Amino acid sequence: MKNEFDIFPKEETINRRKFDVYELRKDFPILSRLVNGKPLVYLDNAATTQKPSSVIENIKHYYTFENANIHRGLHFLSELATESYESARLKVKEFINAMSASEIIFVRGATEGINLIANTMCRANILKEGDEIIISHMEHHANIVPWQLLCERKDIKLKVIPITDDGELDLDEFKKLISEKTKLVSVVHISNSLGTINPVKEIVKIAHSYNIPVLLDGAQAAPHVKIDVQKLDCDFYVFSGHKMFGPTGIGILYGKTNLMNELPPYQGGGDMIRTVTFEKTTFDDLPHKFEAGTPNISGGIGLGTAIDYINQYDRLELTKHEDKLLEYATEKLLEIEGLKIIGKAKNKASVVSFVIDGIHPYDIGTLMDTYGIAIRTGHHCTQPIMQRYNLPATARASFAFYNTFDEVDKLAEGLLKVKKMFQ
Ligand code: PLP
């Protein structure tokens, strides 16, 4: 059968742009604004990333020239909007190397992707009384709470892979947690509060050797590392557009075709049906079965543009720059007396969580803001990690490829000023 998504032409190979961080920063208008009278130093990229002009302009272009509802109209604008939206799906397919564009489900974000899988697996009775789900101690609340809601409904047990003091998953313990009752493993690819890059390929391999499917939460991975869902062989993969230079309110759930076909629709409504009578409704094929109602059309298009933006560069060059920033920041921050980094995994992405003796993280964040430096303080939606390290909160600087070494210097200088104020 011809895949309907193949009607849209593949993007032509793009000539890669040479990576020059100061040139690249010009593409992000917000980075040149002042905050509290100081040049903005934006180091809260794990919460959300800034958007390049191309994303902003393309959303404007869509509403200015193409706005119409998709999939159901035969008129010019509807076809144009459908083509833009579906070509964004194709870009996502290529971005994560899915087998087919019909495995790409547009959702609101990583959170909705996980909730979709939790709810539909439960309704399909793939997850039932007495079953067990394995997550890890370093999950974002988005990969804890949806499973807990299920556990309450169906008496399902949640088991948790412990982490070492350095913030790495204990894989020996993981293996011990697996039993014949385990029906799903759901773990984070990159931790948003520790920066740990988990050995997800190995985790998938172990789980698959027991025929257990694996969901990977890639919210922090999509902006930093190349994702290849076929190589990872994961069954489900979720991420959010806004954390990878795209708009808010749009994200991706990737699911293997055979598994997604086993699941019932998440929501009912228009655009996901084939026939409706008062007696019975039949549902459309993937991906539409999971996309009820008018979707976030401009969001999907904006996400496609964000992927185009990233694809202009050699991804390895971007990652290398971020790795150097992480190394430099770790070095600079450790020079500060009384500062302790939380999360010292060998394999880390560009996140540095830290505490400073005698200064509450909230005070650090508030004072840094007065210097125009945006960092995050709190539990980062990972309260179990805070409990693990016996901390109320941490301060967190998280980098994107548009950050510079000067900004790391400003971070360190700012922290020294904060320390001085408290002495
Ligand atoms: N998973 C991780 C690791 C995250 O860092 C986040 C957001 O910070 C989420 C899931 C949830 O993402 P969203 O709020 O975009 O759905």
Image (spheres, grey):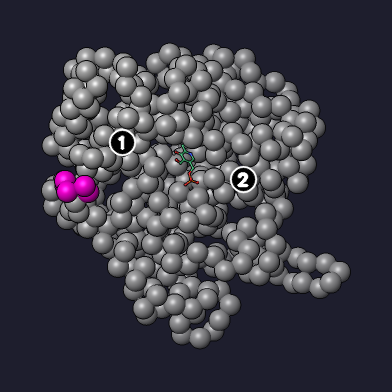
Chain-order first, disc 1 or disc 2: 2
Q: Secondary structure at mark 1?
A: helix
Q: Secondary structure at mark 2?
A: helix
Q: Is residue 349 visible from the viewing direction of this image?
A: no
Give the amino acid at mark 2: Asn
Q: CA distance from mark 1 to mark 2?
A: 33 Å
Q: Is residue 66 left or right of residue 4?
A: left
The answer to whether the residue labelled 1 contacts the one labelled 2, judged by CB atoms less than 8 Å apart, is no
Q: Residue at x 71, y 38 (%)?
A: 150
Q: Residue at x 43, y 55 (%)?
A: 248
Q: Please state the horizontal and vertical placement of residue 212, each as a whole percent of the image.
A: 64, 31
Q: Please state the horizontal and vertical placement of residue 71, each as a whole percent of the image.
A: 56, 74
Q: Nearer the viewer, mark 1 or mark 2?
A: 1
Q: Is residue 181 left or right of residue 74?
A: right
Vertical side of 364 occupied by 358: above or below: above
Q: Is residue 13 visible from the viewing direction of this image?
A: yes
Q: Is residue 38 magenta?
A: yes
Q: Please state the horizontal and vertical placement of residue 27, each as a whole percent of the image.
A: 21, 57
Q: Residue at x 19, y 31 (%)?
A: 414
Which residue position is annotated with label 2? 115
Q: Is residue 95 magenta?
A: no
Vertical side of 43 occupied by 134: above or below: above
Q: Is residue 132 left or right of residue 373?
A: right
Vertical side of 292 occupied by 78: above or below: below
Q: Is residue 214 left or right of residue 131?
A: left
Give the amino acid at mark 1: Thr
Q: Please state the horizontal and vertical placement of residue 90, each as a whole percent of the image.
A: 44, 60
The stretch in magenta equals: 35-39
Which residue position is annotated with label 1? 366
